[in-house]
Image (cartoon, rainbow, N blue to C red):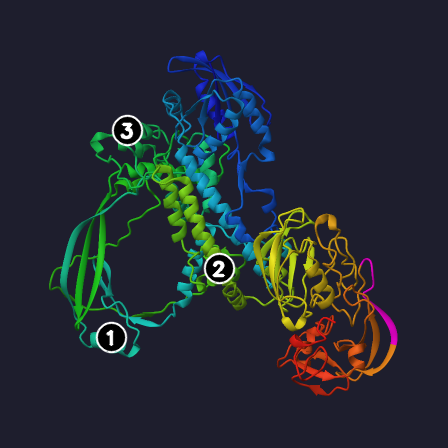
Amino acid sequence: MRALNVAEKPSVAKAVAGILSKNPASGGLRVRDGRSRFNRIFEFNYSIQNQQFQMAFTSVTGHLMEIEFDERYRKWHSCDPVDLYHAPVRKHVPQDKSDIQKTLEEEARKCQWLILWLDCDREGENIAFEVVEVCTRANRNLNIWRARFSALIDRDIHYAVQHLVRPNKLFADAVDVRQEIDLRIGASFTRFQTMLLKDAFVLDVSTEDRNLILSYGPCQFPTLGFVVERFWEIQSHEPEEFWTINCTHNSDEGTATFSWMRGHLFDYTCATILYELCVLEPTATVINVRQQEKLKYPPHPLSTIELEKRASRYFRMSSEQTMKVAEDLYQAGFISYPRTETDGFSERTDLRTMVQEQQHHPVWGSYAQRLLDAEAGLWRNPNGGGHDDKAHPPIHPTKFSAGEAGWSQDHHKVYELVVRHFLACVSKPAVGAETVVEIDIAGEQFSASGRVILERNYLDVYRFETWGGSMIPTYTFGQQAGIGTDATMHDHIKKLLDRFYATKDSSTRFSPTNLGEALVMGYDDMGYELWKPNLRSMMESDMKAVSMGTKRKAEVLETCLQQMKACFVDARSNKGKLFDAMEVFFERSNRSNNNEQQTTGDIVRRCGLCQESDMVLRKKPDGNFMVGCLGYPQCRNVVWLPGSVSEAIVTPNVCSTCNPGPVYMIQFKFRRLEIPPNYSVDHLGCIGGCDNTLKQLVEICGTGSRNNSSVPGRGQGNASSSSNAPQSNSRGQGAWQTAHSSGSFPSQPSRGRNQEAVERNGESSIPCTSCGAPCNLLTATTSANRGRKFYSCRAQGCNFFVWEDDANAGGSVARESNSRSASNPSRRGGRGRGRRGGRQGNDVAFVSATGEPISGRCFVCGDPSHFANACPSRGR
């Protein structure tokens, strides 16, 4: 029989293979290269349950697979971030792991058994099933087993291989849930925050703006929340001066310092009066003496969290460095697996054997000998802390070392902490005698305490802890004595902010940066506690339920993602709160925040230009509608819609003509007075190029203002030129979409690809009724008005025009009021047949060719006896 063994890391594969091949019957350890030069293959013979195997031992390097969105959703501008909550995801082997995959496939084809030696936690179980998926694709008949171990030592490894179990799919499912939730939530909020805020504010960070990512992580952000919340608590504290009275008694036996049982007073006058009363009656009377035995218990067995906390407290070592060193020690076989939540040893654990291995250490060896000496009475079975991850025991030493040649100071410190902690937790608690003395001076009471350590016990080996206490003189009830002197004190707290989300000072104290505080403040103002651990805690609880089989994977995914999607949608609709919070700390940037606009909009179709992102319907700040590519600014494809559109909604209806599809149709509502009378105000249209009605309305009404926002697309010329030519119909884009790229027809005529919009006919004697400047006589060449002449003011910024036949007949001319023009000078009114000026309101006036105002008249023929909708000349 041949068995393929797979470990989580190359070093673990080497260590386990070295242990199992020590048997004389193994035939020695043989090594050969795999496809990956870092993941070698170790071969030897071994007997499992009296059955002989040829063992091939190789490894992966952590996760073999990664989860990611389908190709079309991976780029930041490829979709609306809310789509990431239901976008397809896939789990696959990335390119940089393909050599490992090939090794596994080749070896699996030659084997009958697959033995998984991945780390024995949920993450390791997930990696195990990634290995199973790759290997079973190559060999469906593999007999799959799991080796469970917690230390790279001989007894654990041999026991594990002789007691193989089946891998736990529920543990793997729990990690799948966590990975998918983290991907969807993290990607959606990170894209949302970054695209919304990066260009809107001048951020004082040390990285380049274009590389700045305002990331959000379901674990990262609550951690930031802890830092910010604590910072707010400190900031909200207003220090006040306070006064206290201290009493000191000196005797032949020593000095005792008594503390005022009132603690302190904030009122100086009151404190002074009480102090003076004590001075006037300077006799202290002992009113109570209490003596009692106290115990100081050793710590619980060591979990990962406690290892990190204690390494930080005792050595000022970061959590990252602590775990890196602990991982090194584990892989070298000196300590057990360092990632565990368990803080209690099982009854089956041979604790005395672990202590025996430490007897010869030059520093704590003598203490280990005392522990094993029954007459010393130092041994005590350890109490557990109530946590058990069902995967690994608490962290403990697995091999003796007085220090290795390649160890750094951090390796020595972490190994010493693990050993001393283990020896302490199997020791008796320290025993002390505590004395509390209370005295009375002029009605004010004071107390002093002293402690004598009777038995140090575990404190002898656990040098990191002390049990402080001072000796005090002997007192008896009713004893009297003189008093000492007074003292005052006050406190002051100061914090400094640094960069990014948080910063750590030399004392390892964390503070939020402006950016970190602003983000937490913004979400807090929305009413969401995204920065609190509650949501993550519920997710972790659900994942544990999946691992225990009480909840289904699909059920947890659906519930959690629905909840977070609703949270995201609501957060996006309240994005103003984020802006408000950012403005507290940062100046607004003068860069246009195009990304902000692109975070909203319903999808109309796939972009035919970049072939990567979606085209979405958006309403611009000036009120006009457009369909633009989410790939902006990399892709600047845009479909300009008629300027007369008042409402536009993407419908689920798909155009049956335009390809490539789907192209979703849009329900338009036009302003009645801005379109010709023979057009309906309601229109279900398509922007794919098949809709003649939209084409005609673009030619008649124009496309609204684009002078401030139009920019050259990929491969296009200057934004003010007419090079925003229509895309070819082969991509399904209408030839009408950019026919008036300057947005200034007719007063600033633009050239399409095939024709001029107007022809100049010379000067006119008609003055502009708006500004008095002379007008040009022009001829329209659009299909709807071909050959029709009109007057247009030559003054830049003036939007006056009138059809020649209307002017000669004394008809009306429409123009926008000065207030409208001032607010949007690039917008041109009165397009097509003059309908644009026909809207009545505070910002529109009707005038005759002589400039006299007209009210209550038809703007088609000028007759005051009827309105345009009943004009007999309508449509003529």
Task: For label 3, count other residues whose C-alpha is less than 10 Å away and answer few (under 14), some (14-19) or many (20+).
Answer: few
Which element carries disc 1, helix, strand or loop?
Answer: helix
The residue labelled by disc 2 is 571
Task: For label 1, count other residues whose C-alpha is less than 10 Å away and answer few (under 14), some (14-19) or many (20+).
Answer: some
Q: Residue furthest left?
A: 478
Residue at point 16% right, 51% down? 292
Up-down: is 4 above or below 191?
above
Is 853 on the left or on the right of 553, as rendered?
right
Is 656 on the left or on the right of 447, as rendered?
right
Q: Residue furthest right?
A: 762
Q: Earlier in the sequence, mark 2 or mark 1?
A: 1
The residue labelled by disc 3 is 348
Q: Was residue 33 drawn as part of the magenta stretch in this picture?
A: no
Task: Using the image as rendered, state which of residue 425 and residue 184 is in the foreground.
Answer: 184
Which element carries disc 3, helix, strand or loop?
Answer: loop
Up-down: is 840 above or below 783?
below
The residue labelled by disc 1 is 275
Q: Quadrant of the C terminus?
A: bottom right
Pinpoint residue 625: horizontal percent, then vertical percent. Answer: 64, 63
Q: Earlier in the sequence, mark 1 or mark 3?
A: 1
Q: Which mark is residue 482?
A: none
Q: CA distance from mark 1 to mark 3?
A: 63 Å
Residue at point 77% right, 57% down? 725
Name the mark nearer the viewer: 2 or 1: 2
Up-down: is 182 above or below 760?
above
The range drawn in magenta is: 753-762
Q: Was residue 754 drawn as part of the magenta stretch in this picture?
A: yes
